Amino acid sequence: MAELGKRQSRRWLRPQWRRLRAFLLSATVRTLRRVLGWLSWRASQRLGRCLGRLYWWTARQDRRRILEHLAIAFPELTATDRFRRGRACALHLGTAVAECLHLWGRPAVEATRYIEVDGFEVVEAARETDRPLLFLTAHCGNWELLAPTLNHRGIALSAVVRSMDAERLNQLLLELRVHFGTEILERGARSAARQLLGVLRRGGSLTLLIDQDIEADGAWVPFFSRPAFTPTGAAQIALRQGALVIPAFLERLPGGGHRATFHPPLDLPPDAVAATALMTRVIEEQIRRVPEQWVWMHRRWRRQPPATLRPQPTTNAG
């Protein structure tokens, strides 16, 4: 009976602790937003690196997951190299958060002062076709800066996003994205499909991030040589609506700025799964360019594929 009482007590405490943690985290974000609003861009980045360093040493579960995922993706790296890259990933993410909070209290156009753009002529040529535009991106670099980059150049961006479980934090993130000029289409909402089609039919542009394992229609496609469950919605939309899919990625530069790179539209195969595999391959190429600038703590391989799709162990002939 005593053990049963303990289990029931733990079940009651977990949601209470999650709510308290969400409240404290949202309060911290609001406080940091005020503080970083007073600081300069470079000072905000320095504080962000401190936050990233604190995250690396205190978030033990995430640190372990980052190192495990780096071992999956880069088996050739030594443990020391994986540790260095994992720590660099944490510092980058802390800096990205600080940058967004610093820009939150300023006109969105100020973000473009720190972003150099490469390949935008691709986008301009695509606009001349009068076809819908779908920007393929991922959680690379400071991905939130894609919206002000495009909006500053006259391209209204709509994004399909998944709501976070923590309501307070979700609201803060929505406020940030709206501040950057993004129209939010909530994944799973009843009106999402109608809104999405409306965006494309009126000549708007859409962005979807397909580099995470989420609850959505998807398929198993290779990601760092291992099957990963990947949403197929972007490929389905592009194929049905005849959209041009333009890969677009943010990358942090050594001097404290960023580069937004736009690549030529993809030549999609007619099958949605094959198209999703192609999109994922493009995302993997960007991650390999700068591994430290991706979200390695995400459980990208959390679901196990059918046995027929799993990598087979190699055996030595005796």
Image (tube, helix red, strand yellow):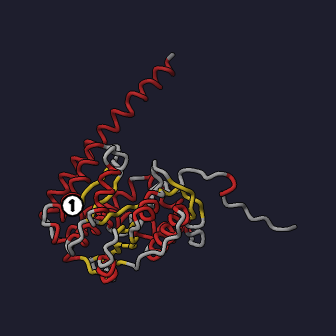
Name the residue beneath numbered marker 1: 101
SS of the residue under disc 1: helix
Looking at the picture, how far across and down is residue 289, in whole percent?
45, 77
Work out whether 154 lies above or below 48: below
- Asked whether residue 313 appears in the rendered view, the answer is yes
Viewer-side residue, 148 vs 253:
148
Farthest-out residue, top: 1
Q: Looking at numbered disc 1 in the image, what kind of residue is underneath it?
A: Leu
Query: What residue lies at 34% left-to-right and 56% top-to-bottom?
Result: 160
Viewer-side residue, 6 vs 30:
30
Looking at the picture, how far across and down is residue 223, in whole percent?
54, 65
Q: Quadrant for the C terminus, please.
A: bottom right
Numbered label tally: 1
Taking the image as shown, residue 112 lies to the left or right of residue 38, namely right
Looking at the picture, how far across and down is residue 46, in whole percent?
25, 69
Query: What residue lies at 44% left-to-right and 24% top-to-bottom?
Result: 8
Query: What residue lies at 52% left-to-right and 67% top-to-bottom?
Result: 270
- Asked whether residue 296 appears in the rendered view, the answer is no
Viewer-side residue, 229 vs 190:
190
Looking at the picture, how far across and down is residue 78, in whole percent?
57, 71
Query: What residue lies at 36% left-to-right and 67% top-to-bottom?
Result: 134
The image quarter containing residue 72 is: bottom right
Work out whether 18 lies above or below 223: above
Viewer-side residue, 202 vs 183:
202
Badge 1 density bin: few <14, some 14–19, many ≥20, Cα 10 Å: many
The image quarter containing residue 99 is: bottom left
